[in-house]
Image (spheres, coloured by chain):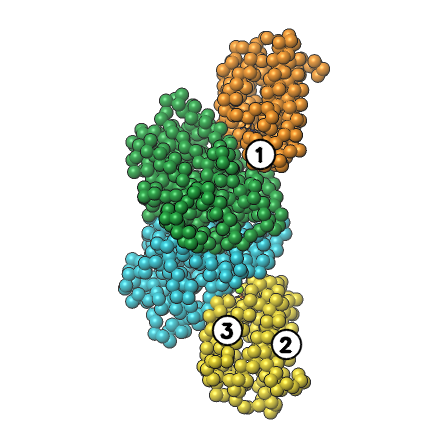
Chain colours: A yellow, B cyan, C green, D orange
């Protein structure tokens, strides 16, 4: 995998992610109730609305323009930490359009890491995002296809999100809860795993293929 | 949940509409649901902008007015607004001498305001950001200290300085000086329900209270059996005085801020004990404010804030204001 | 019960102490726990006095100040003070031109004030008493209509008239005119606990509200399923407009008074709908006030008040005041 | 019975009434919770304190002065309707000192009736007070002793108070509760019955006689 992704392909990925979030947003809010303020599902729904709108038919055909638009409008979701962070992430990806998909994701991550000190282990979205992007990189270095890479990324994100159950929060609202955050997966990490699951579903959907890459 | 609302997704828009309509001579909504003064500040003065989640009324937009804030950027319920609207507010509050951006230390707000500052600088806007973080329950690391009702004196003194025409640097220094000299501690006894989800934001046994509880039910460290008003005031004031290192003869501003369901009756009773203790220690209580300035829905509990004042801070605290929920003649 | 109090029998004394201490420049306690202005009114002006139970803070003592009340006589929790302290207050508020005595229609208060009036007359004091009774839930007999948040405009306009030196008869006429032209309706959704007994003051099923609920849990007649903010505002405003007989083109003051646990967020949302309805009917909303003026502990619900205004009433409503909980510049 | 009562005799009656209220104030507050604001017991306790103080040893020996003092300080209890009404009642009695006990009670009642429109049947203290005073009058007219008269009055007050259970409140806070007041005795009427019970106990106490008059 070192192909550039097209606007349509990324649009399908976004649509897949939006479907995933729409089916699971209640669970995201429930997770956020356990150690946060219960709004994460609602914020993710609004975030996906903005993303879909940026890739809606009739809009620009330029992936960079679409991603910039997506980033800005996700920043404008006004939903607290997660929408700001995801807005930064998509804005960072936009700046790397022209490079391959892995590089774009890496650029998004780099932008994000300028805004937050949270790293894997801190029980935040980073616990899903960093392994997912590492998986993309390994897949690319190993010559796998985009489809295969996205499959690996989704699996890594899910594993990372699941593992947050055993961590104590050190960032975001939940940090003040300390030990009480043990036993619940981090909502932000969980939604990242849904996003990557959806990216894969969306990327593969049109080709009508089965899920086993 | 027994709240008078309509569709949960419209809460913020509707409450802002009602707020503006109830003060048509003083408040109007501009741009993307920004709360601004009806009569903008005179050209050449420093603009003062803040941001923060909704659901804490009258905080923060209740303090927009002559002598306090120029624009507040309300987010969704308990959620920071994003950078785009903050940037819009800063552009609008640029009257020719720069903008002071006052941010309460909460993760989402800090994230948005850092992004806003980057964008504002890229646009060449003249902005200085000041962070309030006076909640001593966060430990000794300033990053872990949240911004609670201390925003009120910061808005007041910085707003007054801006109103009287002081330059941006001076307004910033005043805000920082006020910020360095204040400390807050919160206690909660009863949860609120989140107006969008209808869920209780925390649990607390029937006979317990929690010292250090944050603005949104973020847990503190001091869970204990419910105490009397006097005992509670003693415990909390003691922690605050120690942390700020207050000595006899110094002059303090004290704020007692009700969380929502705690009555003024209780706040006065608590304040009375604070006054007694300060008198006994020879510390001068020079100004006080008792009421609801930042709430968390129908949560019960209160925040106790102390701030070391100097002549100029007192003068600015006393300066006129016509903010709807902080009128000073 | 989760309240920050000390011994129940000391609640009133302690809250009054705290209230006075938090406004030392404006309020002091005189005589037998009467709340008075720190700087008494100038000689030759009419004094304005009121009475009422405690536990409703900031009502009623929060409105003592230049331009409003001279003295308030607080009773025990939810209980009218007796005649002796009322008489004491009237004697103190006699600055040479008589005293206006403003009484809210509640059984205990009326009893005390009738006795007070008899005693005052026997002493040759020049007092006129005005009764507020604007709660339309009481039916058509004025005696059955309680005095709710309508005390606020009456204090304000009569207080302003007295402050500007109008004679007792004129102050009385203004208070009566304000009183005749106002109507209030209350709704409750959640009970308060009585701070002395720790008991809930009423019960209400989880999905119901009660229109017409009084200031102390006295039942109303309109128990119904909980409604949205818009529906509730529509039902209540409709009843009020009909009762007052408001016509298109007339000018109204609207007050939305939170009972204690109902948030400003909700009050703004409700007010927004009131404004929309009035606009649609061509009725002019000329003044508004949204907040907590008289509470019942942590009860949830609100009072909606409308009042027909004329030029003079508006002028007096706008006049300056430095009452701690009603500052007008 | 047409003797004048002495200050000491009335003082003993007050002491008896105070004892009665002190043992039963919780029940009074409970009754007031059912259809009022739950403070009646507390108000009655404070009322009895003031009464006892007005008759305390070391005070005046003049019954008129003691009763005036009692009335004024009960008015100052600041406890809502009932303490104001009882203050008026004792003030009214004071004005009739010099007449016999029945006439004093009648004068108290007359003073009270100037301040309230409530009459028997309205579910207020009047439902106990009026029959009690009527019983005093009958006893006096029938030539009974003070002791016998007070015994009859206590019985009449109790019957009157009990009967309020079947009435709907038309005065005081409870009037807004309408039908819901059915089934509970009126707190004010109940405390009047305790007062008369106590008056009898107190009057008879020193003579050390049994209760059967
Ligand atoms: N500083 C941070 N760095 C990385 N992720 C964060 C940070 N703060 C919060 N998050 C993520 O955001 C999630 C919460 O998102 P959300 O509930 O939408 O925002 P908020 O906490 O403002 O209500 C957390 O579960 C966490 O994954
Ligand atoms: N107008 C009235 N006339 C006669 N008795 C009254 C009147 N109003 C109240 N009461 C009596 O007072 C009692 C309540 O007393 P209390 O609870 O002490 O006062 P409040 O109702 O002010 O709290 C009632 O049970 C009733 O007997
Ligand atoms: Mg959240
Ligand atoms: Mg949030
Ligand atoms: Mg009472
Ligand atoms: Mg009562």
Mark sitting on residue A158: 2
Which residue occupies 47% across, 28% down? C112
Mark 1: few/some/many CA within 10 Å (<14, 14-19, 20+): many
Mark sitting on residue A50: 3
Question: The numbered mark 2 sits on a residue in which chain?
Answer: A
Question: Can residue B187 be seen by looking at this rendering?
Answer: no
Between B258 and B32, the one lying in front of the other is B32
> Disc 1 beta carbon < 8 A from ligand 2?
yes
- How far apart are the two marked residues, 2 and 3, measured between alpha carbons? 24 Å
Q: Residue lying farthest bottom?
A: A143
| Residue B298 placement (x, y as % from top left) | 54, 52
Figure check: C276 above or below C92:
below
Which residue is tagged 1? D174
- How far apart are the two marked residues, 3 and 1, measured between alpha carbons? 57 Å
Between D124 and C7, the one lying in front of the other is D124
The mark lying in front, picked from 1 and 2, is: 1
Figure check: C268 above or below D182:
below
Mark 3: few/some/many CA within 10 Å (<14, 14-19, 20+): many
Tag 1–tag 2 contact (CB < 8 Å): no
- How far apart are the two marked residues, 1 and 2, measured between alpha carbons? 63 Å
Q: Look at the numbered disc 3 and give the secondary structure of its residue.
A: helix
């Amino acid at each position: 995998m070192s192909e550039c992704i097209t606007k349509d392909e990324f649009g399908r990925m976004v649509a897949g992610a939006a479907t995933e979030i729409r089916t699971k947003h209640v669970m995201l809010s429930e997770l956020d109730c356990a150690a946060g303020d219960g709004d994460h599902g609602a914020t993710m729904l609004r975030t996906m609305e903005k993303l879909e709108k940026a890739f809606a038919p009739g809009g620009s055909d330029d992936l960079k323009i679409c991603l910039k638009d997506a980033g800005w409008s996700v920043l404008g979701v006004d939903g607290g930490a997660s929408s700001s962070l995801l807005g930064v992430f998509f804005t960072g990806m936009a700046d790397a359009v022209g490079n391959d998909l892995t590089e774009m994701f890496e650029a998004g991550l780099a932008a994000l890491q300028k805004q937050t000190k949270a790293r894997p282990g801190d029980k935040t979205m980073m616990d899903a995002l960093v392994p997912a992007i590492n998986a993309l990189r390994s897949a690319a270095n190993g010559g796998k296809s985009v489809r295969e890479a996205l499959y690996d990324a989704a699996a890594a994100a899910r594993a990372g999100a699941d593992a947050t159950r055993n961590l104590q929060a050190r960032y975001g609202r939940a940090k003040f809860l300390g030990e009480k955050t043990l036993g619940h997966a981090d909502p932000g990490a969980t939604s990242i795993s849904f996003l990557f699951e959806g990216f894969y579903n969306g990327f593969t959907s049109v080709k009508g293929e089965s899920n086993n890459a | 949940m027994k709240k008078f609302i309509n569709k949960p997704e419209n809460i913020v828009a509707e409450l802002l509409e009602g707020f503006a309509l109830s003060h048509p001579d003083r408040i109007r909504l501009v741009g993307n649901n920004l709360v601004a003064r009806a009569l903008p500040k005179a050209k050449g003065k420093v603009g003062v902008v803040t941001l923060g989640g909704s659901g804490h009324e009258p905080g923060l937009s209740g303090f927009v007015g002559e002598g306090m804030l120029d624009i507040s950027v309300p987010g969704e319920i308990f959620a920071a607004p994003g950078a785009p609207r903050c940037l819009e507010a800063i552009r609008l509050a640029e009257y020719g001498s720069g903008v002071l951006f006052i941010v309460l230390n909460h993760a989402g707000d800090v994230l948005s305001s850092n992004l806003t500052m980057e964008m504002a600088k890229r646009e060449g806007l003249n902005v200085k950001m000041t962070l309030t973080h006076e909640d001593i329950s966060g430990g000794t690391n300033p990053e872990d200290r949240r911004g609670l009702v201390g925003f009120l004196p910061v808005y007041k003194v910085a707003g007054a300085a801006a109103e009287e025409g002081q330059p941006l640097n001076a307004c910033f220094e005043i805000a920082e000086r006020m910020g360095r000299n204040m400390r807050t501690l919160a206690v909660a006894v009863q949860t609120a329900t989140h107006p969008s989800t209808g869920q209780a934001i925390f649990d607390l046994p029937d006979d317990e209270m929690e010292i250090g509880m944050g603005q949104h039910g973020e847990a503190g460290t001091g869970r204990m059996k419910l105490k009397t008003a006097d005992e509670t005031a003693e415990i909390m004031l003691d922690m605050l005085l120690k942390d700020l290192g207050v000595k006899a003869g110094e002059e303090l501003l004290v704020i007692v801020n009700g969380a929502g369901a705690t009555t003024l009756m209780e706040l006065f009773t608590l304040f009375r004990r604070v006054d007694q203790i300060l008198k006994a220690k020879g510390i001068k209580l020079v100004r006080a404010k008792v009421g609801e300035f930042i709430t968390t829905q129908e949560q019960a509990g209160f925040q106790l804030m102390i701030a070391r004042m100097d002549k100029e801070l007192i003068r600015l605290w006393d300066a006129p204001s016509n903010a709807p929920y902080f009128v000073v003649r």
